[in-house]
Image (cartoon, grey):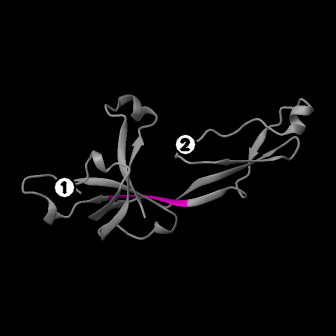
Amino acid sequence: MREIKSSSVGGMVSVKGIVTRCSDVKPCIQVAVYACDACGFEVYQVINGKQFTPKIECPSQKCIKNQVKGQLVLQIKQSKFISFQEVKIQEPSDQVPIGHVPRQIKVIARGPVTRQCSPGDIVQITGVYMPSPFTGFQALTAGLTHDTHIEAY
């Protein structure tokens, strides 16, 4: 874990550690499906990040031609979700130099790799070392602009 540097960002890394915390498995939306309440037109929105702005107005030719501002309603049952879990791992005590504090790193698991570990397990995690921007109030108070995590495979 101590050998992961800034040059590793965007690259494949493998880390051995002890799981200290696991979040609950939550749904993460991948494709949002909306239906227009005026014309019934369906709109699909692919979601790539943690946050997204929902669509509001219907872009169909029928609504534009009739000069109607059809409202889009999110269709939960037709939307596609994937499992999402955050795991924190800490480097093993045998890898910590004497007098130093053990390092921790956040691991994000999606899909079939969720529910694979629990706190106290010793794990070998392989994934991509990625930056993640601070959002909300945290972005205003943070000195740095990004945090880092591993996208687990």
Dominant SS of magenta comes to strand
Q: Quadrant of residue 131?
A: top left
Instruction: Identify the residue at image location x=65%, y=58%.
Output: 80
Q: Secondary structure at mark 2?
A: loop
The residue tagged 1 is: 102
Task: Using the numbered discs, state the Cα–Cα distance from disc 2 to disc 1 in whole angstroms.
Answer: 31 Å
Asked if labels 1 and 2 touch by Cβ distance under 8 angstroms, the answer is: no
The quadrant the N terminus occupies is bottom left
Q: Viewer-proximal residue, 43 or 18?
A: 43
In reply to whether residue 137 is colored magenta, the answer given is no
N-terminal-most mark, 2 or 1:
2
Q: Quadrant of residue 139?
A: top left
Residue 10 image point, x, y percent? 38, 50
Instruction: Identify the residue at image location x=11%, y=52%.
Output: 100
Q: Quadrant of residue 55?
A: top right
Residue 83 image point, x, y percent? 54, 61
The quadrant the C terminus occupies is bottom left
Q: Residues within 10 Å of mark 1 (few under 14, many from 20)?
A: some
Residue flagged by tag 1: what amino acid is it? Answer: Pro
Report the span colored magenta. 83-88
Q: Is residue 65 above or below residue 94?
A: above
The residue tagged 2 is: 51
Residue 41 image point, x, y percent? 84, 46
In reply to whether residue 84 is colored magenta, the answer given is yes
Residue flagged by tag 2: what amino acid is it? Answer: Gln
